[in-house]
Amino acid sequence: MKIEDLIRFLNEKSAEYLVIGAQACAAHGYVRATADMDILIRPDEKNIEKVRAALEAFGYDTTDASLEDFQTKKILFRQYWYDVDVHPFAAGVDTEEVLKNGMSGMYENVPTHFASLNDLIKMKKAAGRAKDLEDLRHLEEIRRQQKKS
């Protein structure tokens, strides 16, 4: 399976999610290497069950992750082929606002929901790690170029 299959499963389950992190940077025009996918989810019980079902369809074992874990922690699901981080929140932003502001796009020909450029910039600023600050530099330049157009 490929990571786009996970996105397909999330869509089939009607899960509320956004791709954040490096894959979202790519959706906005800045591509860098990454070995994982970060997804932000609506952390309510109904949506978590949809996300869990999609993860299990993809081949991840979610039995050790409780409802409370999905609601309060970033959870790393690791398999042979790809790591997926599931986030119930992200630093510097309100989850509900980010979900509302999300944009649609494509990932490997699969319809995908991504964080907006402005929200991604806020998340990168708040994260503050070296790679996030490097992403931030590129994302802010993309935003400047968009404003000029």
Image (spheres, rainbow, N blue to C red):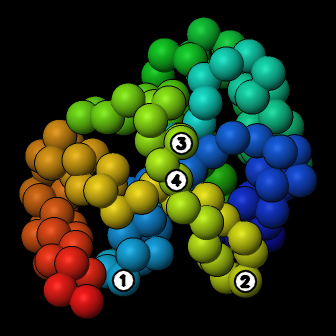
Residue located beneath label 3 in the image: 100
Quarter of the C terminus within the rendering: bottom left
**Residue visible at 67% across and 82% down in the picture:** 108
Does the CB distance between marks 1 and 4 fall below 8 Å?
no
Q: Is 57 above or below relative to 30?
A: above
Q: Earlier in the sequence, mark 2 or mark 3?
A: 3
Residue 62, image x, y percentages? 74, 30
Residue located beneath label 2 in the image: 109
Q: Which mark is residue 102?
A: 4
Q: Earlier in the sequence, mark 4 or mark 2?
A: 4
Residue 4, image x, y percentages? 71, 70
Q: CA distance from mark 2 to mark 3?
A: 23 Å
Residue type (three-letter) at the residue carrying disc 4: Gly
Residue located beneath label 1 in the image: 29
Q: Is residue 100 visible?
A: yes
Q: Is 25 above or below relative to 86?
A: below
Does the CB distance between marks 3 and 1 fall below 8 Å?
no
Q: CA distance from mark 2 to mark 1?
A: 16 Å
**Residue visible at 37% across and 70% down in the picture:** 25
Q: Earlier in the sequence, mark 2 or mark 1?
A: 1
Q: Secondary structure at mark 1?
A: loop
Q: Secondary structure at mark 2?
A: loop
**Residue visible at 61% across and 66% down in the picture:** 104
Quarter of the N terminus within the rendering: bottom right
Does the CB distance between marks 4 and 3 fall below 8 Å?
yes
Of the two numbered discs 2 and 3 in the rendering, the one whose residue sits closer to the viewer: 3
- In the rendered structure, the answer to whether residue 6 lies left or right of residue 22 reads right
Q: CA distance from mark 4 to mark 3?
A: 6 Å
Residue type (three-letter) at the residue carrying disc 3: Lys
Q: CA distance from mark 3 to mark 1?
A: 21 Å
